Image (cartoon, grey):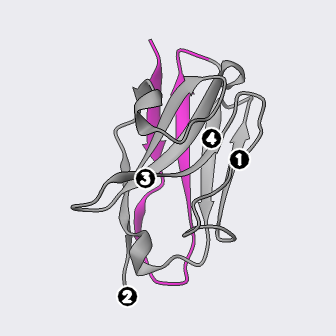
Amino acid sequence: QLQLVESGGGLVQPGGSLTLSCAASGFTLKGYAIAWFRQAPGKERDRVSCMTNTGVTSDYADSVKGRFTISRDIAKNTVYLLMNNLKPEDTATYYCAARRFLCSPRRTDFTSWGQGTQVIVSS
């Protein structure tokens, strides 16, 4: 059974950094693309970044380019999202999601989801 578990969220001041983790079980990252999405209260769930099964990174959302970095550790079967220079508008629940092989811009193309981890950027 495919399972994704996010961790690493919390409260951080503007300009600070956080690293989110997405631990996968029941499947190997070598066969799946993993994306990070985020959803702020009252807003749509938007894709932040994605990495294919071969480790190719897709384009980042314009709002996070130059500040966020997606990476993975195959041995740990875990995908990370390093978030630097955080802004209040980055406040959201962050989710990781999986689909076979390739990334997709469509949320509905991802078949497995984690429970989410909350990030609050506030002074």
The reply, left or right, for residue 99 in relation to residue 113 is right
- Screen quadrant of the N terminus: top left
Report the mark closest to the observer, 3 or 4.
Answer: 3
Disc 2 residue crowd, few under 14, some 14–19, many 20+, Cα 10 Å: few
What amino acid type should be assigned to the residue bearing mark 3? Asp
User: Residue under circle 2?
Assistant: 123
Report the mark closest to the observer, 2 or 3.
Answer: 3
Distance in Å between CA atoms under marks 2 and 3: 24 Å
What amino acid type should be assigned to the residue bearing mark 4? Val
Q: Secondary structure at mark 1?
A: strand
Query: Please, which residue is most extreme toward the left here?
Result: 42
Q: Which mark is residue 46?
A: 3
Q: Secondary structure at mark 3?
A: strand
Distance in Å between CA atoms under marks 3 and 4: 18 Å
Report the mark closest to the observer, 1 or 3.
Answer: 3
Q: How many marks?
A: 4
User: Marks 3 and 1: in contact by CB < 8 Å?
Assistant: no
Report the mark closest to the observer, 2 or 1.
Answer: 1
N-terminal of the two: label 2 or label 3? 3
Distance in Å between CA atoms under marks 2 and 1: 28 Å
User: Residue under circle 1?
Assistant: 71
Q: Is residue 2 magenta?
A: yes
Instruction: State which region is magenta.
Output: 1-27
Q: Which mark is residue 79?
A: 4
Q: Secondary structure at mark 2?
A: loop
